[in-house]
Image (cartoon, helix red, strand yellow):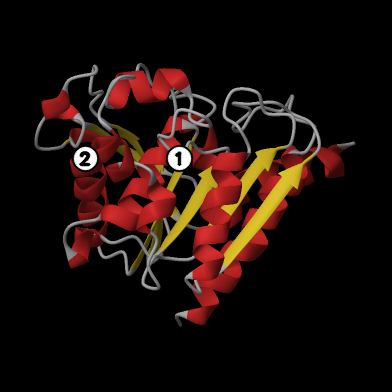
């Protein structure tokens, strides 16, 4: 029994040895970035954009709950972005992208050579917006990880609340096209990892399928995983029956991405 207890303590100490130090920064415009750094050197970081339909932010299961996993299992620095919400104001619809660009540049300023962008649902829309619409070279992400993302603003497949909050349900088609990200994929778009459930009724799977087809047609490396059940918004919840599968697949994919650039 004593030996078992000692082993458990040793394992706990090994986890703590790479556990995160936590710091919250305020970006220009008021967005907040909470950074979890490892206690050992790393040159790779992931910026997470929580979902919430651009009306609120799911900061736990699509945000801070992933920090220790990112640091210990993936071995990367991790940051949760509390981006500004546009409130259906035309002048504010580009603010989330500006916040994501600042977040990527902030992580680069801390010595990160590879910075990925990640998001769930509407946060996945923001992550894909950065991947396809970034406006400066130093704000470009090196890879993208999308959980059940909103991709299109087309009324037939978009999430209504996401469109209403970002650009308005009655926004002109020209603005909807600006934020329909499958239309903006280029060969230079960073590689993608996409995961979702087939029975998702919150965001139609066609969003992910359109994005995957656009990436494939542009010659961009993309890995797509569709699980048969789970619905929408599972994030890092233990209740999602395929949690072990999607996290394991992401770990393998990310290791390949990191090794390709060494």
- Please say whether residue 194 is visible from this viewpoint: yes
x and y percentages locating residue 210 in the rendered image: 55, 50
90 w.r.t. 119: above or below? above
Residue in the foreground of this view, choosing between 13 and 225: 225
The reply to whether residue 24 is in sight is no
Q: Secondary structure at mark 1?
A: helix
Q: Quadrant of residue 237?
A: top right
Give the Cα distance between marks 2 and 1. Answer: 14 Å
Above/below status of 192 relative to 27: below
Residue underneath mark 2: 99
Q: Are marks 2 and 1 in contact (CB under 8 Å)?
A: no
Count of number-bearing discs: 2
In the picture, the disc for residue 205 is none
Describe the element under mark 2 as helix, strand or loop. helix
Residue 226 falls left or right of residue 183: right
- Percent from the top left, x then y, of residue 143? 44, 62
Neighbor class of circle 1 (other Cα within 10 Å; few <14, some 14-19, many 20+) is: many
| Residue positioned 18% across, 57% down in the render | 135
* Residue under label 1: 124
Q: Nearer the viewer, mark 2 or mark 1?
A: 1
Q: Quadrant of the N terminus?
A: top right
**Front residue of this view, candidates 247 and 128:** 128
Residue at the outermost front position: 173
């Amino acid at each position: 029994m004593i030996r078992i207890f000692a082993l458990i303590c040793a394992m706990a100490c090994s986890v703590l040895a790479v556990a995160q130090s936590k710091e919250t920064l305020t970006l220009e415009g008021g967005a907040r970035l909470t950074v979890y750094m490892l206690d050992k050197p790393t040159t790779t970081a992931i910026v997470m954009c929580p979902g919430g339909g651009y009306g609120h932010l799911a900061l736990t299961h699509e945000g801070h709950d992933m920090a220790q996993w990112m640091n210990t299992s993936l071995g990367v620095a991790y940051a949760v972005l509390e981006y500004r919400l546009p409130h259906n104001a035309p002048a504010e619809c580009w603010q989330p992208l500006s916040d994501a660009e600042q977040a990527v540049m902030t992580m680069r300023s801390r010595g990160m050579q590879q910075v990925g962008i990640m998001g769930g649902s509407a946060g996945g829309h923001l992550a894909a917006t950065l991947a396809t619409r970034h406006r400066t070279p130093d704000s470009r992400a090196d890879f993208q990880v999308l959980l059940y993302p909103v991709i299109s603003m087309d009324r037939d497949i978009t999430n209504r609340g996401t469109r209403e909050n970002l650009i308005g349900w009655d926004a002109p088609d020209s603005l909807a096209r600006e934020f329909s990200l499958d239309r903006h994929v280029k060969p230079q778009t960073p590689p993608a990892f996409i995961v979702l459930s087939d029975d998702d009724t919150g965001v139609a799977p066609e969003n992910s399928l359109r994005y995957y087809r656009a990436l494939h047609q542009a010659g961009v490396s993309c890995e797509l995983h569709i699980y048969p059940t789970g619905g929408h918004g599972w994030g890092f919840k233990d209740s999602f029956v395929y949690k072990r599968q999607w996290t394991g697949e992401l770990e393998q994919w990310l290791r390949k991405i990191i090794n390709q650039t060494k």
